[in-house]
Amino acid sequence: MERGLLWLPLLALFIGLAWAGRTEYQKVEAYRIWAEKFQRAKYDLYAVLGQNDSDLTWGKPTRQEPADLKTFSLKDVQEIRLRVDGQPIDVNAPPRKGKAIALEFVLTEGDSIQVPFTQVSLAAKWGQVLSKDLQALHS
């Protein structure tokens, strides 16, 4: 009886981990299907991002399909900034770590769009690639 009570918390932990793993797998599978229609795409715990030519679509990953999708064009972007902990950072010399990481797209109307990332290095690579695409559009 006592041994059974000792194993009960471990069983609950195992069930919780299995549920969390299944949920994350469903999110990744929904992203995979969604990402097939894009030339370039990224999955992140915070956001999904897809690119077709100059159009960028981003939203929040869910188990069914990405939600809260928003689309904008690089043609409407004036500048792309990497923000780490609220501070603008050079995409060519990013820090190794940070808490709040986002790519900020400053639009020509003055508005800005921030796409969150979990990894500084991934955000910096996307920033570099998208900055090159932006320069090619404006030249």
Image: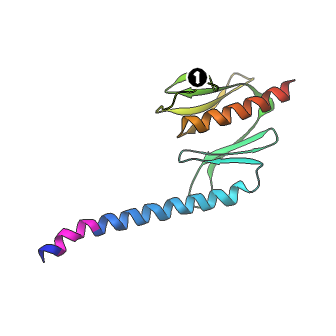
Q: Quadrant of residue 27?
A: bottom right
Location of mark 1 (residue)? 89
Residue placed most toward the observer, 88 or 69: 88
Q: Few, some or many C-alpha atoms within 10 Å of disc 1 (few <14, some 14-19, many ≥20)?
A: some
Vertical position of residue 61 compared to residue 92: above or below: below
Left or right: where 11 falls relative to 117: left
Q: Residue at x 65, y 27 (%)?
A: 112
Task: For the C terminus, give its image quadrant.
Answer: top right
The dominant secondary structure in magenta is helix
Q: Is residue 48 magenta?
A: no
User: Which of the two residues, 71 or 124, is positioned nearer the viewer here?
Assistant: 124
Give the colour scheme shown. Answer: rainbow
User: Which residue is at a point 53% across and 33% down the rendered structure image?
Assistant: 101
Would you identify the image quadrant in which residue 20 lies?
Answer: bottom left
Q: At which x and y percent is residue 42?
A: 65, 47
Q: Position of residue 118 (x, y in %)?
A: 52, 40
Q: How many numbered marks, from 0 up?
A: 1
Res. 75 visible in picture: yes
Where is residue 50 drawn, in percent x and y?
71, 46
> Is residue 60 positioned above or below 109 on the image?
below
Q: Which residues are magenta?
A: 4-10
**Quick one: which residue is furthest to the bottom in this view?**
1
> In the picture provided, is 7 more to the left or to the right than 44?
left
Asked if 3 appears above or below 38 in the picture, the reply is below
Q: With 30 as the anchor, is 18 left or right in this view? A: left
Q: Is residue 115 visible?
A: no
Q: Hey, what amino acid is under mark 1?
A: Ile
